[in-house]
Amino acid sequence: MRTNTNTKAALLSSAQSKTRTGSDDDPVLVIIDMQPDEFPASSDEKTIAGVMREITNAKANLWGIVIVEFDPHETGKTDPRLMRLIEGYANLAVVAKSEDDGSAEIFEAIIEHGFWPENLRICGCNSDACVLRTVEGYAKRVPSSHIQVVKSACNCLTGPTNDVWTEKFPSIANVEVLP
């Protein structure tokens, strides 16, 4: 799903007119590909604990939460521990994507649910693939956005010391790496 410039402007205007919880400064928590059946890095207990902290914080602050799943019919669903933690949460969207960059699906879900599209807080797997591509895609899609990537709630097969944290994320406009 590709959104052209006119459609983006209309969607942003629509988001501004919808009733939302929280304020425009509140981020939307985006959790990417925490599917243990397909992505081994998503089974790491430290990563799961980090994502659970992010969910708990988002819920306490009434932020929107978007769960992103890579082809869930083929690769399995999000870790059940995470899904139990958000069960019944009203400000939740679950979206499927079929490529590394899930920014189009995230943007559409944010607008559809009346969340504010300017501020994202992203975590999940794999930090050097789907997380990176989604951050790049969203930064292009919504150039005025501010995107926080939470290192302690991300993982990938190459581990936490790859260059994505020191070179790639810092080189993207409006992106902030959090510990």
Image (tube, rainbow, N blue to C red):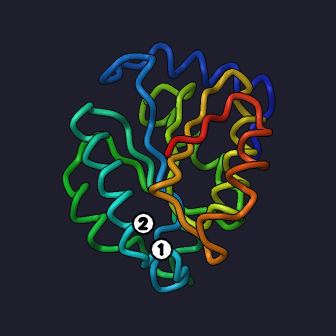
Give left or right: position of 92 versus 155.
Answer: left
User: How far apart are the two marked residues, 2 and 1, measured between alpha carbons?
Assistant: 7 Å
Above or below for 32 versus 72: above
Q: Which mark is residue 11?
A: none
Mark in the foreground, 2 or 1? 2
Residue wearing tag 1 = 42
Seen in the image, is 110 located left or right of residue 161? left
Q: Secondary structure at mark 2?
A: helix
Which residue type does callout 1 highlight? Answer: Ser
Q: Which comes sooner in the sequence, label 2 or label 1?
A: 1
Is residue 143 something one can see in this rendering?
Answer: yes
Task: Report crowding for label 2: few under 14, some 14 to 19, many 20 or more residues within 10 A (C-alpha).
Answer: many
Residue contact at pointers 2 and 1, CB within 8 angstroms:
yes
Give the quadrant of residue 99. Answer: bottom right
> How many marks can you see?
2
Comparing 52 with 28, the one in front is: 52
Residue 141 in picture, x, y percent from top left: 74, 35
Name the residue located 22 percent from the left edge and 65 percent from the top edge: 84
Residue that badge 2 annotates? 47
Image coords of residue 88 (percent x, y):
19, 52
Q: Residue at x 30, y 64 (%)?
A: 82
User: Looking at the image, can residue 68 be seen?
Assistant: no
Image spot of residue 21 (x, y percent): 30, 24
Query: What's under tag 2, amino acid-wise?
Result: Thr
Q: Which type of secondary structure does the marked residue at label 1 adopt?
A: helix
